[in-house]
């Protein structure tokens, strides 16, 4: 869908397309209605973004994740799915946990990566979130190439964000990630 077609669709639906912003920094320091966590399927914390969110957010996040595991997600959260908890001590109302796919040369898993963004935005809208901060899902230890991950993220957010979300912020840990997301945003028009 072209930028013009998206704008027409948004006008006809009585809404404007959300602003996409890029920030170089630490996602745990962001002020947003919802912060997205690149979680592992256990929901019990881990390394990278997941570990940082659990450490900075405090035990309230882990307690809610344990409750989710004990009730609806006994086998863990599926790849591409999303679920919300409190944000604990983070400067946000909610953390939205999503499990990204591990990149593979043999199998195209881009639909699963796109689903992480779609499902996170769906949950954010259900929560009434206006601002949503995302990391670059699956581009760390899961090995997704940053340029492709950025392209999928930007495209999917542009297509999937709905009211009340007015700002989607990609919080990128280093300059290389920022540059790839900047290029993807420019290419998307």
Image (spheres, rainbow, N blue to C red):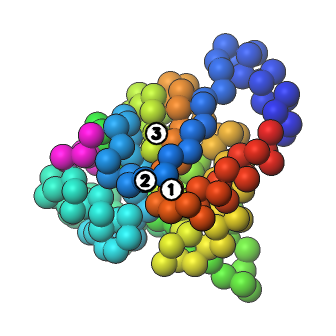
Residue 82, image x and y in percent? 45, 54
Q: Nearer the viewer, mark 2 or mark 3?
A: 2
Q: Determine contact: label 2, label 1, CB under 8 Å.
A: yes
Query: For mark 1, what is the residue?
Result: 172
The part of the chain drawn in magenta is: 82-91
For this view, does 174 lie left or right of residue 15?
left
Label 1 packing within 10 angstroms: few (<14), some (14-19), many (20+): many
Q: Could you tell me which quadrant the N terminus lies in?
A: top right
> At x 21% / y 62%, what residue is drawn?
55
Looking at the image, tell me whether mark 1 or mark 3 is earlier in sequence order.
Answer: 3
Q: Nearer the viewer, mark 1 or mark 3?
A: 1
Q: In the image, which disc is placed on residue 25?
A: 2
Residue 183, image x and y in percent? 73, 53
Residue 181 in sight from this viewpoint: yes
Query: For mark 3, what is the residue?
Result: 132
Q: Between 114 and 171, which is closer to the camera in this rendering?
A: 171
Distance from label 2 to label 3 (Cα)? 15 Å
Looking at the image, tell me whether mark 2 or mark 3 is earlier in sequence order.
Answer: 2
Q: Secondary structure at mark 2?
A: loop
Q: Determine contact: label 2, label 3, CB under 8 Å.
A: no
Q: Secondary structure at mark 3?
A: strand
> At x 72% / y 22%, what residue is drawn?
10
User: Vertical placement of 59 versus 133: above or below?
Assistant: below
User: Vertical placement of 153 versus 122: above or below?
Assistant: below
Q: Determine contact: label 1, label 3, CB under 8 Å.
A: no
> At x 78% / y 30%, what residue is drawn?
6
């Amino acid at each position: 869908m072209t930028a013009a077609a998206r704008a027409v669709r948004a006008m006809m639906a009585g809404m404007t397309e959300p602003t996409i912003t890029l920030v170089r920094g630490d996602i745990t320091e962001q002020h947003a209605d919802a912060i997205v966590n690149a979680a592992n399927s256990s929901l019990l914390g881990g390394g990278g973004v997941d570990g940082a969110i659990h450490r900075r957010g405090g035990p309230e996040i882990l307690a809610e994740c344990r409750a989710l595991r004990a009730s609806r997600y006994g086998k863990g959260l599926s790849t591409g799915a999303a679920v919300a908890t409190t944000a604990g001590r983070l400067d946000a109302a909610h953390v939205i946990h999503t499990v990204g796919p591990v990149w593979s040369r043999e199998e195209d898993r881009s639909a699963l990566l796109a689903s992480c963004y779609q499902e996170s935005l769906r949950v954010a809208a259900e929560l009434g979130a206006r601002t949503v901060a995302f990391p670059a899902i699956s581009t760390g230890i899961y090995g997704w190439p940053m340029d492709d991950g950025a392209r999928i993220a930007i495209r999917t957010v542009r297509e999937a964000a709905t009211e009340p979300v007015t700002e989607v912020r990609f919080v990128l840990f280093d300059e290389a990630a920022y540059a790839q997301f900047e290029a993807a945003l420019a290419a998307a028009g």
